[in-house]
Image (cartoon, rainbow, N blue to C red):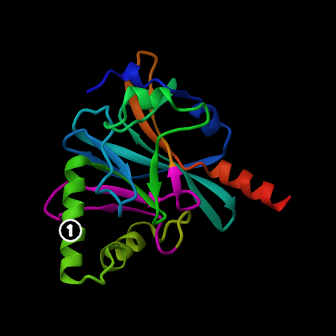
C-alpha cells in the first residue's frame, strides 16, 4: 500500500456537510473481506480499480445524507462508510491504486479523480464482492442477452428495501444487494445525487492521520448552482 502522505490532496468537506441541513440514514453494513474498497456505478465496475488505501477486513456501517429539496423531493448528497467512531478532522482525495504520483501533481486546484455514474446509482463494495457481482451479471446476460440486471434482479430489492421510507422514492433509493445469497459479501447501493455524473470520494482522517471514514460527495450544490445560472 502506498504511503497516505503521497495522496494528501486536502478538501474542506466538513464545512460543506455542516453548512447543509441533511438527514442521516443508516442503510446497512458493508462486508469488506479483503479491505480493498471499490466505489463505482454498480453496472460499470469491471474496469474500476480499488482504492490505494485499504482498511481492516470487517463489516462497517454505511450512511447516506439526504437533502430535502422540498417536502416531496429528496436527494442523496453524500454516502459514507464509517470505520471508527471519532469525527474526521480533515479529508483527502481517495485515489485508486492505478493513479501515479505524476498524475496527482498534474491536477489543477479545481480538478479531482473520481468515478463515473451512468445508471443514476453508485455503490460501495469489496474487490472480492465485485468479482461475484460481475459474474452474476454475466451469467444473466449469457442466458438472455436482452436481460437487464436492474429490471431482473435489483428493482424488486430496491423497492422492498427502501421504497417505503419517507425519504425515498417508491421505487427505492438504496439497497443491500448480495450477488451470492450464500455469502455475506454485499454491495450497498444508492441513488447518486442528481443522477449521472463524475463524483469524488474522500478519506476522512482523525488528528493522528488514521482513516475514520470514506465519503462520496455527489456535488448536489454544484448542480443546483449550475441550474440557477442557466435560469438567469
Q: Residue furthest top?
A: 208
What is the magenta range?
170-198
Q: Who's the residue at 26% across and 82% down the image? A: 145
- In the figure, 83 relative to 225: above or below? above
Give the residue drawn at x 19%, y 59%: 132
Q: Position of residue 14 (x, y in %)?
A: 58, 32
Q: Position of residue 8 (x, y in %)?
A: 46, 23
What residue lies at 53% left-to-right and 66% top-to-bottom?
168
Residue 147 is situated, as x and y percent measured from the top left of the image, at 30, 81
Can residue 145 be seen here? The reply is yes
- Which quarter of the image is occupied by the C terminus? bottom right
Q: Quadrant of the N terminus?
A: top left
Q: Quadrant of residue 178?
A: bottom left
* Magenta-colored stretch includes residue 76: no
In this image, 179 relative to 37: left or right? Answer: left
> Which residue position holds label 1?
136
Amino acid at each position: 500500500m502506498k504511503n497516505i502522505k503521497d495522496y494528501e490532496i486536502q478538501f474542506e468537506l466538513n464545512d460543506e456537510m455542516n453548512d447543509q441541513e441533511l438527514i442521516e440514514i443508516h442503510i446497512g453494513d458493508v462486508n469488506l473481506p479483503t479491505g480493498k474498497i471499490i466505489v463505482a456505478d454498480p453496472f460499470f465496475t469491471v474496469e474500476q480499480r480499488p482504492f490505494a488505501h485499504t482498511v481492516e477486513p470487517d463489516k462497517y456501517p454505511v450512511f447516506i445524507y439526504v437533502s430535502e429539496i422540498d417536502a416531496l423531493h429528496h436527494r442523496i448528497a453524500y454516502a459514507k462508510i464509517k470505520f471508527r467512531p471519532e469525527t474526521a478532522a480533515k479529508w483527502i482525495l481517495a485515489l485508486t491504486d492505478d493513479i501515479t504520483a505524476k498524475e496527482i501533481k498534474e491536477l489543477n486546484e479545481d480538478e479531482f479523480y473520481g468515478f463515473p455514474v451512468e445508471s443514476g446509482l453508485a455503490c460501495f463494495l469489496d474487490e472480492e464482492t465485485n468479482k461475484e457481482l460481475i459474474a452474476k451479471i454475466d451469467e444473466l446476460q449469457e442466458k438472455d442477452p436482452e436481460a437487464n440486471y436492474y429490471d431482473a434482479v435489483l428493482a424488486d430489492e430496491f423497492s422492498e428495501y427502501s421504497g417505503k421510507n419517507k425519504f425515498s422514492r417508491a421505487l427505492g433509493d438504496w439497497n443491500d444487494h448480495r450477488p451470492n445469497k450464500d455469502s455475506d459479501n454485499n454491495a450497498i447501493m444508492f441513488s447518486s445525487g442528481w443522477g449521472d455524473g463524475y463524483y469524488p470520494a474522500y478519506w476522512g482522517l482523525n488528528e493522528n492521520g488514521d482513516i475514520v471514514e470514506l465519503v462520496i460527495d455527489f456535488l448536489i450544490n454544484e448542480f443546483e448552482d449550475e441550474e440557477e445560472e442557466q435560469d438567469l
